[in-house]
Amino acid sequence: MVENSPSPLPERAIYGFVLFLGSQFGFCKFVLFLYLVWAYVPDEWLHSIGLTYWPQKYWAIAVPIYLLAAVVVCIVMLFGVNMINTAPLSSVDNITDVYARGQRIDDCQKRAIPRLKDVSISEVNRIFYLSPQ
Amino acid sequence: MQNGDQHYSMEDETYTDIDGKAISLECQSHSGFCREFTVSSAKVSIGRVMVYTCAVWLSAYIVFFITENTAVLSSAIIITLVGMMVHIHFVKVDHETLLIIGSLGVQVSSSYASGRESTDFIEMDKIKDIVINEAIHMQTVIYYLCILLKDPSDPEAVSSVVPLFQSSKPRLNCLVKVYKSCQEILAKC
C-alpha cells in the first residue's frame, strides 16, 4: 500500500505544470495571442480572409500606453489619497474616538479578569514618562 | 532676568528634530509656577541662500540664451527676491516658545526669521492636559507635544487638540523634558 503523504513528487510537479499551462493558454494567453495577431498582421491580409470589422490599428499602440499612464497615475494617487485621509496632527481622532468615549466604566468583580478598555492618553503619558524607572 | 530665575541651556545633550537637524532647547524657570521653554531651529544659512540664488539665476540665463527673451531674466530676479522675502517672513521659523503659568494659562508663540512673532494664549480653564502623543505624519510616526482642550460643558471630553512646536518638531528626548516640567506645574494648580 503506497503511503499518502503531501510531499512533492515528480508526477505531482508534472500535473501542476500542465494545469498551469492550461489555465494560462485557456483565456489570458488566448486574448493576448489574438491581440498580437491583430496588431501585427496587415489589414489587407485580414480583409482577404474575410474578417473586415476590426478596430483601427491606432488603438494597438494607444491602449497599452493608456494603461501604462493609468498605472503610474494610480500609484501617485494612492499615495495622495492615503495622505489626504490621514488625520492631521491637530485632529481629535489622534487622541480618542467615539468608541473610547462611550465605553462603560463598570467595577469588576473581585479576582475576575477586568474588562478590556481604552486607557486615556493622560494616563499613558503618566505611566511612560513620569513614573520613576 | 530676576534674581530667582534659573536658566538651563541643556548643553550636555544635543537635541535634533525628526529630520536629524540640530535644534536647541532652553528652559527658563521664572518662578515656582512659571516656566518658559524655547526651541530654536537652525538659522537661515547664507551658503544655502547663495547656492539657490546662483542656481535660479544660472538657469534663467540659460533660458535667456535659448529664447533671447529678456523678460526671463527680470522675472527670475523678481521671483527670487519676492520668494526670499516671503520665505523669511511667513515660512522660516526661528524659535518657538511655550510659556506656562500655573493656574493662569499657557502662551504659545512662534518667532519668524524676519522678526515677526505670532502668539496665542490659552486659559487654564480650557486646558485638560498637556501630553505627548504619537501620530502618523507623512509616512512616518512621530511624537509631538500637544495641549488637550476641554469644552466647559463637558469636562471629561477632549474638544480639540493644539499641537506644539510644529515647525521645529523636536524628538522624544526634548519633548519628555518639556512634558515633565509642564506636568510639575499642572499638578500644583
Image (tube, rainbow, N blue to C red):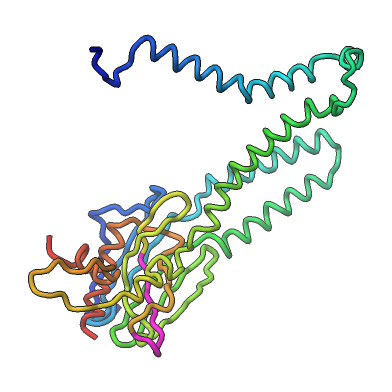
Residue at the far top in the pictured view: A10
Give left or right: position of B83 versus B20.
right
Give left or right: position of B113 versus B19.
right
In which quadrant will I find the N terminus of chain A? top left
Give left or right: position of B87 versus B13.
right
Judging depth in this view, the residue of B183 and A13 nearest the camera is: A13
Q: Position of residue B27 (x, y in %)?
A: 29, 68
Judging depth in this view, the residue of B166 and B63 nearest the camera is: B166
At a point 40% along the width and 72% down the height, the residue shown is A98
Judging depth in this view, the residue of B42 and A93 nearest the camera is: A93
At a point 75% along the width and 35% down the height, the residue shown is B62
Q: Where is residue B41 in the image (x, y as percent from the top left)?
A: 42, 58
| Boundaries of the magenta span | B145-155
Q: Where is residue A5 in the image (x, y as percent from the top left)?
A: 26, 20
At a point 27% along the width and 79% down the height, the residue shown is B30
At a point 79% along the width and 15% down the height, the residue shown is A40
Q: Is residue B165 above or below residue A7?
A: below
